[in-house]
Each structure stands twice: as structure tokens, then as C-alpha cells.
Image (spheres, rainbow, N blue to C red):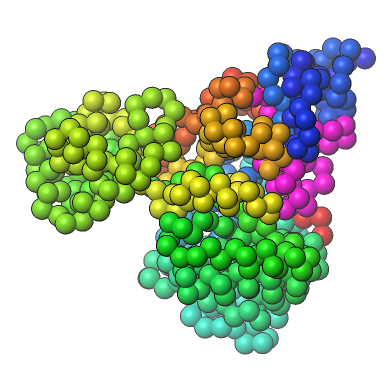
Amino acid sequence: MSHDLVIRDGLVVDGSGGEPFAADLAVDGDTITAIGRVQERGREEIRADGLAGTPGFIDLHTHLDAQIGWDPMLTPVSWHGVTTALLGNCGVTFAPCKPQDRQFLAEMMETVEDIPREAIIDGLPWNWESYGEYLNALEGMNPAINVTGMVGHGAVRFYVMGERGIDENPTPEETARIAEVAGQSVRDGAIGFSTNRLPAHRLPDGRSIPGTFAEAEELEAIARQVGAHNGLMQNVPWYDKNAIGRDLEFLGRQARAGNGRVLFSVVETESFRFEDPHQIVEDLRAEGLEIYGVTVPRPGGFVSALKTNIFFPAWAKLRELDVDRRLDAIRDPAFRAELVAAAKADPASDAFAAGLRWVGDGDRPIYTKPAEDNLAALAAAAGEHPAEAWLRLVLESDGSAVFHRPFFNMNFDAVEALMARDWVVPGLGDAGAHVSQIMDSGWASFLLSHWVRDQRKLSLAEAVRRMTSSAARVLDLKDRGTLAPGMKADINVLDPERVEERRPEVVRDFPHGKSRLIQRAAGYKATVVNGHVILRDDEHTGERPGRVIRSSG
């Protein structure tokens, strides 16, 4: 007898949080069939030689809804051990959609999530109206990893109310219809429903997206329908000191109405200079309500580099150049002098430089610098203006220098305290979104390298538990998230001493030649999805065995 795949001599970190143990793993078809000493040979074998064998990681906050249409490998997350990704966050989705509303949904996704509308329109087949039909389309795209999706408030409101759904609240009849469509979407396979309360998430005309100002009664009606079919309610609250208390209380109202699971994007608040409001969530959970938060385990923020548009505000002339012409342009001393003069004349330059941190010139980016170790300080030490320092570092690196401008989760002590709460799951990397501005998708590799290996704040077993079985519980996935016979064979084989992120870089691989940021990883010997090896030694194999995971409700 033989097995389809055997992973030999690994250190099994099974996702339960228990002590790792030495064992082999056998896989047949898409299922783990044995853990222990496996005598039989495998048609395919991976020599782990003491490396960690973990469940595949689950990313609870992505916007790969569009990118899956032209990048079935779902990079960058598939480089970082993610084997299941949750789509449809933040209330912005492409279904349900009447044919005449496709442009509206594409433009909403572009302005909220910085995904080019041309790529969205031309990169997807748009052969659906309902959310279930959208999932059918995703299945035809044969993704490399598993995906599951939520139906978005913005799409549902516009589907039911049209233009009125942007600025007006629904009538009682419309509320019932919105809830009905949300519930039907879950019956058709959506894992849940997402809503967004950030007023800054806007349409092209400047108005906040549909659902931003929804009243509690509308959300409760939706939660009842979604919860009746075991669906998840996902929220993006507004972290404003005058709004966050209300928005966290809304989580409780949804959980009570639907008697179901609620997930929200959670961040530390010391950086925002107001008191931590999360005791509200602790109190709600003490009632027995199932509320979870997801946070990125490092500072989240913008990437400043020659090929992004995140640099000194006064540099309009550089911003207007094609990204592939910029390096030659700044090699010209006269053009550099013009840029430096413009920065010196702009009062906004000082604040920009104070918020910018160089990630270093090594392969591994440094995201852990204190706020005072910024571009302004680096320039002062060299006797330069910050604009001169930025240009010098870019030229010395032949254009590859990267700077980071964090804007949330900047206080590491506060992030550590936030992650210590047992209802907080790591994630919030926004993969597939903000493609020209932000690259936080390597969060899993950062968790393992910084919090586990460098700081020893988490054990390997605990970090893996949070990224696997804890995340699976949020989605109510019964057959993924742990390594055990009978579970689906989503597996990583990784080197805890080598795993880490690589520096962000810009590539031009979107439809119409549009560019985006990516971030590779190191230390992953293999990633297995549904029994098939999709990655070996940090490189994809070309296998695409992922599935669309539908709601069990």
C-alpha cells in the first residue's frame, strides 16, 4: 500500500496549541489519513527533516475578489503559507449585481480599495447576478488556494434600492428585502455578510458607500437572516473617539439578533490618542456573544518607493512620470535639485519625513523601528534635507529602496496587548487591495519571524493556533485548521529559523499593464492545498487545487 503524499520527519505543530511532536504525515486525495510513523511510501514525498509542519494559514481579511480573475495563484498570500482566504470584506463586493450596475460596483471597489476599475471590468467574466452565481464563476477560475466569500452591504443596498441606497435609509419594506437578499446569498454559499462604517470609504463622487450610516435596526434585520443560515457578520467600525463606542455596541446588537458569529477589524488606539474601548467587546463576550476581532500583527501603512506614488507631496512632476522612467529622471542632477527645492518650499514635507521609516537595505524589511527613527532623523544625521536623503537612498539601491509610512498599529506594546486578547486573530493584511499603496500581506511571516523567533513573545504552537484553528472557528470550518486524520490536507512545511517577509516590490502584471505591490517570503519548504503541493522552496509549482468553500447553512 502507498499514500499519495507523505511528509517525513517533521515537527508537527498541529494547530491546537499543544506541544509540537515529531511525526510523519500521510495524505490520500484531499485528506490527511495518518499522523505518526508512516511505514508506507508516498507517490510523492517531502523530507521535512525536523522543519515545522503546520495547518495552512487562514487569512480573514482580503480583497482578492477581483484579482482572482487574472491571478489564480492569489499572490502574495500564497507565498506566505495562506491556504484559505476570506473575500468580500468591508462591504464592497461584485455581487449581487444587475447587468447595468457593473460599472458602479467596479468604481466603488476602485475608490475604496485602490483596484483599477479597468482591470476589474475586463479581468472578470461578469456572468452572474446573484452571489451564488458569483461563487460559481469563482469555481471556474481554478484558484491555487481555497477561497470563501461574504456578500457586501454596498452591493446589496444598491441592488435593492438603486441610487437611493447611497444617501437614504431603506423603508421597512426595503429593509426586509435587503435582509432577504443577504440571507439568500448565505443560503447560496456566502460565508457571511460584510458592512463598513468608515465615512472615508467613498464613491468616485465623494459620497460614502452605501450602508455606511445604516441604522442598528437594518443591521439587526440582516443579522437575523444571515444568522439563521449560520452566516458570519463582518464589520469595519469607525475608529473615531466619538463613533467607536457606538460601532462596538452595534456588534453586540448584531450578535444578539442573529445568535451568530460577528467579526470586526480591530486596531490599537494609543496611536490615535484615545482610550482603549475594547472593554465593550469583553463585556459583550461575557454575555456569551461570539464576537471576534482581526488585526495586523505589525504596523500597517503605506509603502513609499520610486514606483509608488507615496512620496513628498510637492513632487507632482515625479508622480506624473511613468514608473519605468523615474529612475533615469532622478539620476539627472538638475531634476533632483528641482525636487529638493520643491520639498523644501512645501511645509507638508516635514510631517511627511517625520512619518516615514526606511526599511533598510537587507532582504528582510525592518518594520520595527521606533517613531523617532524616521527619515527626518536619518537626514539630520547625514546633514541633508529629508528629500535629499530619500533620493540618495533610492539612487544607491538602483531604485529599489523602500520606506514605510505606518498609520495604524504603530505602538508595539499596545499591539502586543491587543493580540493577547483571546478573541483577536492575526490578519488584516488587505491582500488584493490598495495595490499601489499598501503591502501588509506578509503578516503571517512577520508573526512567525518577529513575535515568535525574534521577540519570543509567542510560542510557535500558539502563533500557529491563532492563524489556523482560531481562524477556522471564526468561519466555522469544521474540516480545516488542525492537522489530524480526517481533516483536509492544507499543510505548510516551514523553517521557523528562516521564515520571514521580503521587501515589497512593484510589478506590472495587472490587466492593461497596471502595476501593483507584491511581497515574497522565505522559509517555506512546501505548501499543500487539498493534498496538492502548490509551493516548493518559496516558489509556486503551478498546481491550482483550491476550492470555493461555501456556507454550511
Residue 192 appears at what percent x and percent y? 70, 60
Q: Is residue 133 placed above or below 205 in the rendered structure?
A: above
Q: Which residues are magenta?
A: 467-494
Q: Is residue 385 left or right of residue 62?
A: left
Q: Front-most of 373 and 125?
A: 373
- Taking the spot 78% from the left edge, 48% from the top edge, the residue there is 477
Residue 357 appears at what percent x and percent y? 33, 41
Residue 482 appears at what percent x and percent y? 78, 37
Q: Front-most of 459 and 343?
A: 459
- Taking the spot 67% from the left edge, 32% from the top edge, the residue there is 460
- Taking the spot 60% from the left edge, 63% from the top edge, the residue there is 278
Q: Is residue 276 placed above or below 39 in the rendered structure?
A: below
Q: Quadrant of the N terminus?
A: top right
Q: Is residue 370 magenta?
A: no
Q: Is residue 506 placed above or below 237 in the rendered structure?
A: above
Q: Is residue 1 placed above or below 96 in the rendered structure?
A: above
- Taking the spot 72% from the left edge, 26% from the top edge, the residue there is 53
Q: Quadrant of the C terminus?
A: bottom right
